[in-house]
Image (spheres, rainbow, N blue to C red):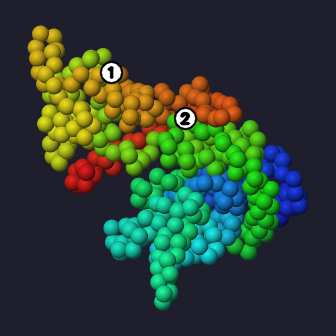
Amino acid sequence: MSSDRVRLNADLAVLVETVEWSPGELASLLDITVATIRRYVVLDDACSVAATLWVAHTHVFEAFATTPYLSVTSAEKRCGKTRLFDVLSLLVARPWRAISPSEAVVFRKIQADRPTLLLDEVDAIFGPKANGNAEALRSLLNAGNRRGTTVPRCVGASFTLTDFNTFCPKALAGIGELPETVADRSVPIRLKRKSPGEQAERFRQREALEVTQPLAQSLASWAAHAAPSLAEARPAVPEVLNDRAEEAWEPLLAIADLAGEAWAERARLAAVSLSTGQAQEDESIGVRLLADIFCIFDTSNLERMPSAQLAEKLAKLEEAPWGDLRGRPLDSRGLARRLKRYEIHPKVIRVGTETARGYAREVFEDAWSRYLPSNASLSVTSATLAQPCAFAGDSATVTPDTLLRSENGVFPLNHADVTGVAHKQAEEEADRLRRDHADIAEGRT
């Protein structure tokens, strides 16, 4: 047995006997959980921190009003989703691993056992060839992250009206993307295939149980001790997170806070890294249009712009969809149609000595403040409009001075780590734009 394994077993032996949990002891427990998960699955620090806090959360989820889902996705097969579920199933509270269950099976199982649902192969459930049961299951998942949400059904020969509880921790794994409404309620774990230089230990369940069984017992012991304080917790949440992400991360941040300052900062860096810059449900192609218009006005330093000129500038943005909308670039008429939903209309404006139908910057201010991240505090990645505009949450917004909201104080983020976060967000934003472009080209928008 290696020296690392001996030391790990010794640490676990101490934790199993723990009755009064100090921040240091909880930090050790979380550190061991991270090391155990990463022994078998190649994960970066943000993903391993999120998975670890979610595991701890499954043992104490009843203390919270909401439960975050864990979304485990990859672009291709053989990226480690099933292996991660193998490890999670040995660590979470009351694991129930299922593939393609019906809606009725899910809500009856939740009502009976309050399990941690590990739902694998969700791409088969929600994919283009899915049957009609997928919508019912999607509705259940959309509502099942909040305490008190029930599914009413008539049961038995007498058709007795029964409310089935749907509130429990859930992890979902699949290739590609989850339905947006489900992903919006999730903490994302994005897996890639191992590179030639990355190694993970072969998973053998009998040997894995030697470590995970006392680890799961320690988590259950800690949960019994921590539940009362967690029920009253109001953790600081990074301001760059949207409302859904705040709701998802709040229980995990509350757990991290109990483990001391190092874990508190580590968890918030993971939250910013994983849950900003995503394509959220309300970040539609229309929101993308508002963001690009903001960038154009911001870089041109103009207060008014003719419709034709604005449409032409939009069409020149690289990686934006406006240059090829079903084979044609966006024109003045199409621009007016898309802005109408936001109660923005072209009017006769004066530009120099000439007049034309167009837009004044001020008519966008209300929509920018309502629909764009961080109250339209946006930046441009380049001085020229040949580059796409960047959403708030990139490096111009996340700075060393970024602070976290809290009833009890503020916590600054670490600048070196946030710089890497911003780069990751920019990559994710580019992926989202490409998906939006594909949607328009195929007539789905």
| Residue indicated by mark 2 | 239
Judge from the rendering whether residue 308 lies leftward or rightward of residue 365; answer left or right. left
Q: Tell me the distance, in whole angstroms, between the alpha carbons under discs 1 and 2.
A: 25 Å
Disc 1 element = helix
Quick one: quadrant of the N terminus? bottom right
Residue 202 placement: quadrant: bottom right
Q: Is residue 41 visible?
A: yes
Query: Which residue occupies the foreground of this view, 343 or 81?
Result: 343
Q: Who's the residue at 85% across and 57% down the image?
A: 15
The local crowd at label 2, few if under 14, some if 14 to 19, many if 20 or more residues have their Cα within 10 Å, is some
> Which labelled disc corresponds to residue 309?
none
Disc 2 element = loop
The local crowd at label 1, few if under 14, some if 14 to 19, many if 20 or more residues have their Cα within 10 Å, is some
Identity of the amino acid at label 1? Answer: Thr
| Nearest to N terminus: mark 1 or mark 2 | 2
Query: Which residue occupies the foreground of this view, 272 or 320?
Result: 272
In this view, 46 is above or below 131: above
Q: Are marks 1 and 2 in contact (CB under 8 Å)?
A: no
Labels 1, 2: front one: 2
| Residue indicated by mark 1 | 299
Residue 337 spot, x, y in % from top left: 18, 40
Query: Which residue occupies the foreground of this view, 165 or 277?
Result: 165
Q: Who's the residue at 30% across and 28% down the image?
A: 364
The number of callouts visible is 2
Judge from the rendering whether residue 263 lies leftward or rightward of residue 154; answer left or right. right
Residue 387 spot, x, y in % from top left: 33, 31
Residue 174 spot, x, y in % from top left: 47, 64
Residue lying furthest top in this view? 353
In this view, 82 is above or below 394: below
Query: Which residue occupies the foreground of this view, 219 or 64?
Result: 64
